[in-house]
Amino acid sequence: RIIHTIEPVFDGRSRVLVLGTMPSPKSREVGFYYGHPQNRFWRVMERLFDLPDHALVENGTRTAFLLAHRIALWDVLASCTIAGASDASISDPRANDLTRILDAAPVRAVCCTGGKSAQLCRRFDGALLSERGIPLIALPSTSPANARMRLGGLVRAYEPLVKELNL
């Protein structure tokens, strides 16, 4: 059983909440989201925001980037049983309390990174998001397991995140 120990990244200006499922073993090891070197999340952010390659390597730089761009980052689950980083193996999930962020920031959209994240967010938080008029946007996984999508396709798929920031 894995307990989520990485704090969410957000402040009172956060407009888009990006949710993964649960930190991978590598992310837990480095103490930050999307920490596996083959995960393309940070490369997608670099491309979306016209940053140089490898601009978002250090955790402090990543945090500053997220806050500067009004992006909150967390995971749907507070705990679960999981084999490695396989979302398909998740059982006994327990949700994080999204009101921690939603009550503190003017979040206008929730973007889930991957099908399992979106499924669990709908299950645990669908009513909450609906009550607040916050859309849930399902985005593809940036995990190396999602090998069928190339970086360019991921960048195009993540464009709704930028659109929500600019509304």
Image: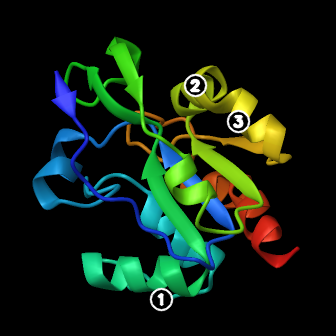
- Asked whether the viewer can see residue 135, the reply is no
- Residue at point 60%, 82% (across, down): 69
SS assignment at label 2 = helix
Q: Secondary structure at mark 1?
A: loop
Where does label 1 land, which residue? 52
- Of helix, strand and loop, which one carries label 3? helix
Residue, far left: 29
Q: Quadrant of the C terminus?
A: bottom right
User: Vertically, is 147 above or below 163?
Assistant: above
23 or 78, which is in the foreground?
A: 78
Q: Amino acid at mark 2?
A: Phe
Q: Residue at x 53, y 32 (%)?
A: 117
Query: Contact (CB < 8 A) between labels 3 and 1?
Result: no
Label 1 Cα neighbours within 10 Å, binned few <14 / some 14-19 / many ≥20:
few
Quadrant of the image occupied by residue 94: top left
Residue 48, can we see it? yes
Give the answer, above or below, for where 138 lies relative to 32: above
Disc 3 designates what residue?
Answer: 128
Which numbered disc covers residue 124? 2
Amino acid type at image mark 1: Pro
- Gap in Å between the C-alphas at discs 3 and 1? 37 Å
CA distance for labels 3 and 2: 8 Å
In the image, is 58 to the left or to the right of 116? Answer: left
- Amino acid on which disc 3 is placed: Leu
